[in-house]
Amino acid sequence: MIFANPSYLYLLLLLIPALAWYILKQRGAQASLQVSATSAFHQMPKTYKAYLRHVNFGILMAVIALVIIVLARPQSTDRWSKSDTEGIDIMISLDVSNSMLAADFKPNRVEAAKDVAAQFINGRTNDNIGLVIFGKESFTMCPMTTDQSVLLNLLKDVNTELIDGGATAIGNGLGTAINRIKDGQAKSKTIILLTDGTNNAGDIAPVTAAEIAKTFGVRVYTIGVGTEGTAPFPAMTPYGTVVYQDMKVDIDEKTLTDIATVTGGKYFRATDKNKLKGIFEEIDQMEKTKISVKEYSKKQEEYLPFALAAFILLAIHILLRNTLLRTIP
């Protein structure tokens, strides 16, 4: 057993002068009576009060000692477990251009990507994770944080209407993520970039952004999101209704592969939600190779038995003082 506030235990030393004071007080409180002999008193029986007269003081001293122990906060450390301290900085860069509304993923690509990303975030409890979204331009939705609830709430609000989704600026999306992660304190820095198109906007070339990521020691995993061939895309009719039209899926896999290769990452192609989930699980396992495992003790508060004992003894002290051991001045 250990104590969270061990300095309070020094208060126990105050019990020594209190005990000395009580002894001196008892000596001074004895009445004296001059008699010729005491032999006549030897056979007189002693009452229970003679035996219990010091009990109340002893109980009070015990109560004070127990209260001091409670203040010192006794804790047990006999429960041990292992904790994974990953120490990894991760930025998720998500394409939210209009094409991410394609229904080859249910209900659409962006919602499927959000769902899988949320599961990934829930499994990385000790990492700093942030979120960047991009379309024609890029925007930091959430800086790196260990507060999963904040990140997940912001991820839930992501949609294709937050920024101009008329084009896809992959280089800008990657560049913004690099800018957020480059100053992180973790030894391992990772960006996961999801897109379903080709770079046709922005002022940073994707491969140039990859070279910058390499300079800062950032690994980039790229994911091409979209089925093979054609996919149903939503379109608005003149009557205000939405219809789906099959359009060719055009993903610049060469550029995405080059980005991953330059930074030491890997390119993946997700043709449905299950494959996308499997890709995130694979990335999760690859990044966990850098986990360092250490043991730590779980401390549990153990003050309650001492507090209960102090309360019971105090109640006994009050009861005895007002009944059996009551003194009359």
Image: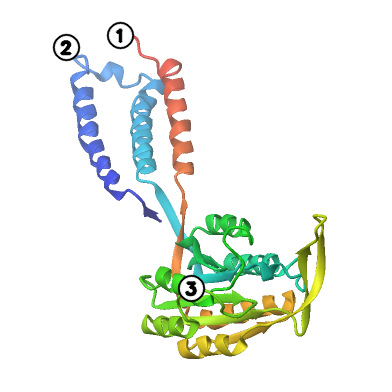
User: Cα distance, mark 2 to mark 3?
Assistant: 107 Å
Q: Earlier in the sequence, mark 2 or mark 3?
A: 2
Residue 84 to residue 32: above or below: below
Q: What residue would you read off at disc 2? A: 34
- Image quadrant occupied by the N terminus: bottom left
Query: Image point 36% across, 18% down: which residue?
Result: 44
SS state under label 3: helix
Type of amino acid under label 1 = Pro
Q: Amino acid at mark 2?
A: Gln
Residue 143: x and y in percent read 46, 62
Q: Say which label, 3 or 1, has the lower sequence index.
A: 3
Residue 199 place in picture, x, y as percent: 56, 79
Write down the residue under mark 3: 172
Find residue 172 and report its horizontal and vertical position in percent: 48, 73
Query: Camera-side residue: 131 or 161?
Result: 161
User: Who's the residue at 26% across and 40% down the image?
Assistant: 11
* Marks 3 and 1, how far apart at CA: 90 Å
Q: Quadrant of the C terminus?
A: top left
Q: Determine the secondary structure under disc 2.
A: loop
Q: Quadrant of residue 321?
A: top left
Name the amino acid, label 3: Asn
Q: Nearer the viewer, residue 51 or 160?
A: 160
Nearer the observer: mark 2 or 3; the answer is 3
